[in-house]
């Protein structure tokens, strides 16, 4: 089991140093205290090695860290890829434990270990994994887990039935091809004014370069990162096919929020505290809040339309909402789930 730092050692170190300090060397006292606390934390966390239990199972060894409570958060925040790559290369057993804000996470990188974990149904229940992701990444309250657990399989079947099989699959593909035929001629508008650009251009920072040809004519060229441009183009076409055009018109920033949330995936899944000053985490949390708020508005508007009310000027037509989303909406409504708890953000994000 991972070893936590002895709760009394920091108080002891601080007491010892402070009794020998004078007002003139307060800064030195603080620095020495921090250094001693970090050193003691490193030494104590180094004793947490993989050990064999009485039942023959092995505990996962904790990677040593310098900071109490924070654990590996600072190293992870500086470079998550470099941090994980270094631990992977230095791990002899293919699995190690890290401390994020006082919580322990076991990370397996060996394909054989990962395969063995998922081969055990009890150890990797797909329903529990889905709920964990909904809680950590999409912000669903844990108090809502029991309610969702009863309809989670049916919600998943809505996607399988209407997006991955005929006739729903053919309908979506036909709509995608038609949308691409319509918009591909304007893939690049060669205008530098964002208000005149397409949504996918605005989200991709397309720069229009102007020059003169030898004959004096204006020569236009566009400079853009091709991958974000294609990604935003496909996203702009696909989102209305899933959620309807009204959703896209009411929420033109949806793609940028999806990407901002996606960039924070590793941090949110790891349980990095929301108060920790990592810009990527803060952007992801703000994007998640906006996505949940807009999806809530979408469901409230559908409820009003279903009840014969006026959903507002921005929500006039739900006929182009996909069959998959309509089926999920019906399931949420029939189970009396309020709009703010209808977590369909994963569908928009995916």
Image (cartoon, grey):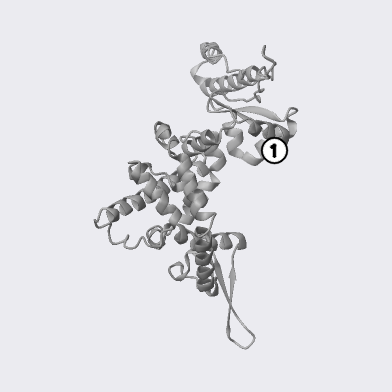
Residue sitting nearer the eye, 345 or 89: 345
x 26%, y 53%: residue: 307
Counting from the top left corner in percent of width and height, residue 65 is at: 63, 25
x 61%, y 17%: residue: 3
Counting from the top left corner in percent of width and height, residue 203 is at: 50, 60
Horizontal arrangement in the rendering, residue 334 relative to residue 138 (left or right): left
Counting from the top left corner in percent of width and height, residue 339 is at: 34, 45
- The residue most toward the front is 166
x 41%, y 51%: residue: 327
Q: Which residue is mark 1?
A: 85
Image quadrant in which you'd find residue 36: top right
Residue sitting nearer the eye, 160 or 181: 160
- The residue most toward the left is 309
| Rendered-image quadrant of the N terminus | top right
Number of numbered tags placed on the structure image: 1
Secondary structure beneath dot 1 equals helix
* Image vertical order of residue 47 relative to residue 79, above or below: above
Image quadrant in which you'd find residue 37: top right
* Image vertical order of residue 141 relative to residue 29, above or below: below
Residue sitting nearer the eye, 243 or 47: 243
* Image vertical order of residue 98 relative to residue 138, above or below: above
Counting from the top left corner in percent of width and height, residue 21 is at: 53, 15
Horizontal arrangement in the rendering, residue 143 relative to residue 109 (left or right): left
């Amino acid at each position: 089991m991972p070893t936590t730092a002895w709760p009394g050692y920091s108080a002891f170190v601080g007491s010892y140093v402070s009794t020998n300090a004078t007002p003139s060397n307060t800064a030195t006292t603080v620095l020495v205290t921090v250094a001693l606390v970090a050193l003691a934390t490193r030494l104590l966390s180094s004793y947490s090695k993989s050990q064999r239990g009485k039942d023959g199972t092995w505990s996962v060894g904790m990677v040593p860290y310098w900071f109490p409570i924070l654990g590996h958060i600072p190293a992870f925040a500086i470079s998550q890829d470099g941090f994980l790559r270094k631990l992977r290369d230095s791990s002899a057993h293919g699995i190690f434990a890290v401390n994020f804000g006082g919580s322990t996470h076991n990370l397996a990188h060996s394909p054989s270990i990962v395969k063995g974990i998922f081969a055990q149904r009890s150890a990797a229940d797909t329903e529990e994994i889905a709920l964990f992701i909904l809680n950590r990444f999409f912000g669903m309250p844990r108090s809502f887990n029991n309610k969702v657990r009863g309809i989670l399989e049916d919600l998943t079947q809505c996607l399988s039935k209407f997006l991955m099989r005929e006739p729903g699959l053919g309908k979506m593909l036909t709509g995608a091809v038609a949308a691409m035929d319509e918009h591909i001629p304007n893939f690049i508008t060669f205008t530098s004014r964002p208000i005149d650009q397409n949504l996918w251009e605005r989200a991709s920072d397309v720069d229009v370069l102007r020059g003169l040809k030898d004959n004096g004519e204006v020569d236009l060229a566009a400079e853009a990162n091709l991958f974000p441009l294609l990604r935003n183009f496909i996203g702009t076409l696909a989102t209305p096919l899933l959620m309807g055009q009204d959703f896209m018109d009411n929420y033109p920033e949806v793609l940028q929020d999806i990407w901002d949330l996606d960039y924070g995936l590793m941090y949110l899944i790891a349980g990095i505290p929301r108060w920790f000053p990592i810009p990527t985490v803060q952007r992801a949390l703000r994007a998640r809040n906006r996505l949940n708020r807009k999806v809530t508005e979408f469901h409230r508007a559908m409820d009003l339309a279903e009840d014969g009310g006026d959903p507002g000027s921005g929500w006039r037509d739900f006929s182009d909402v996909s069959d998959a989303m309509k089926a999920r909406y019906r399931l949420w409504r029939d189970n009396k789930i309020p709009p703010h708890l209808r977590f369909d953000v994963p569908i928009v994000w995916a």
